[in-house]
Image (spheres, rainbow, N blue to C red):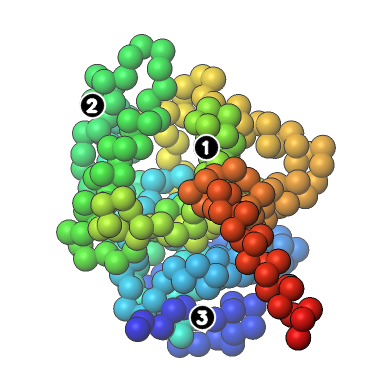
Amino acid sequence: MQDALNFDPRDRQEAPSVTTSPIQEAPSPTLDARGRREFNKLQKRLRRQMGNAIIDYGMIHEGDRVMVCLSGGKDSYTLLSILRNLQRNAPIDFSLVAVNLDQKQPGFPEHVLPEYLASIGVEYHILERDTYSVVKEKTPEGKTTCALCSRLRRGSLYGFAEEIGATKVALGHHREDILETLFLNLFFGGSLKAMPPKLLADDGRNILIRPLAYCREADIAEFARLMAFPIIPCNLCGSQPNLQRQVVKEMLGEWERKHPGRLESMFKAVTNVAPSQLGDRQLFDFAGLEEKQTRLLASRIDLLNE
């Protein structure tokens, strides 16, 4: 059996590097001493939270080849950066490969990601698929493009993961993404589900991991700002008005402003489910409660008679 990545980045001493990257990412050189201290605290917090998520869900094992899906947004840049940071101190050997899906959106700056990834010495691939034209052709006027775009993007990336021998596919979803999905399914899908930190794809070919699952979006945004990542905005879906996800995001943000700590409590609930207190008959045997009661009472009577 493979050994899981089982270290706590809060306590581990510096270990020999397992990566050959010639350049280490660093925050903006314009930071003063106080700014660097705050940056170090932020980076350590993200390292700790990501490390704990990896440990809790057994995300990375000895010899894994982790494909990091890099969109050019703040989340995927942070995912790659913190994973590389953890990789240098890990007691196991695993490799990282960054993959970007060029969807052929008009005006997409094709040079940005290759230049950035080459500069930090990361193995990478740019996968070219014209999903933009398909999405525009198939999506009715006034409808959002997210669902179809996501399906096409996932299909392209998952298939490519097999081609390059990736054993895990790392996605940049964070705590708020998971909670937003929970409420979208609750409000519009009639189901109580979110994004699991680790998932076996429906076809059984890929294991997906979300190492940022414990991380706050605000921390990720600040880290990306301080690192001065070359952010590429998504003009395909980000420009659409009235996206339900954006509405839910604003709702959660308002709750957190009025009641600090509420999102943390809600995320804890996602990891602390009591099936007997809900109503899913496939998760809990409600029909068999009478039989269970009979067994418990019989056992109780036997104990009293001894």
Residue at 66% in and 60% down:
293
Work out how far the residue at label 1 is from the one at label 3, CA to CA, in angstroms.
34 Å
User: What kind of element bears circle 2?
Assistant: helix
Query: Viewed as shown, does residue 159 lie left or right of 151?
Result: left
47 w.r.t. 265: above or below? below
Percent position of residue 168, x then y: 34, 63
Where is 135 relative to 210, above or below?
Answer: above
Is residue 225 in view? no
Q: Which one is in front in this view, the residue at disc 1 or the one at disc 3?
A: 1
Other residues around mark 2 within 10 Å, as few (<14) / some (14–19) / many (≥20): few
Judge left or right: residue 126 versus residue 282. Answer: left
At x 25%, y 33%, the residue is: 131
Amino acid identity at mark 1: Ser
Total numbered labels: 3
Q: Which residue is mark 1?
A: 191
Q: Residue furthest front?
A: 305
Kindly identify which residue carries mark 2: 134
Label 3 vs label 2, nearer the camera = 3
Q: Earlier in the sequence, mark 1 or mark 3?
A: 3
Residue sitting at 53 percent across and 27 percent down?
A: 188
Question: Which element carries disc 1, helix, strand or loop?
Answer: loop
**Identity, as a three-letter code, of the amino acid under mark 2:** Val
Which residue corresponds to the image point at 44% horizontal and 79% vertical from the top-left? Answer: 4
**Label 1 vs label 2, nearer the camera:** 1
Q: Residue furthest top?
A: 141
Q: Residues within 10 Å of mark 1 (few under 14, many from 20)?
A: few
Q: CA distance from mark 1 to mark 2?
A: 29 Å
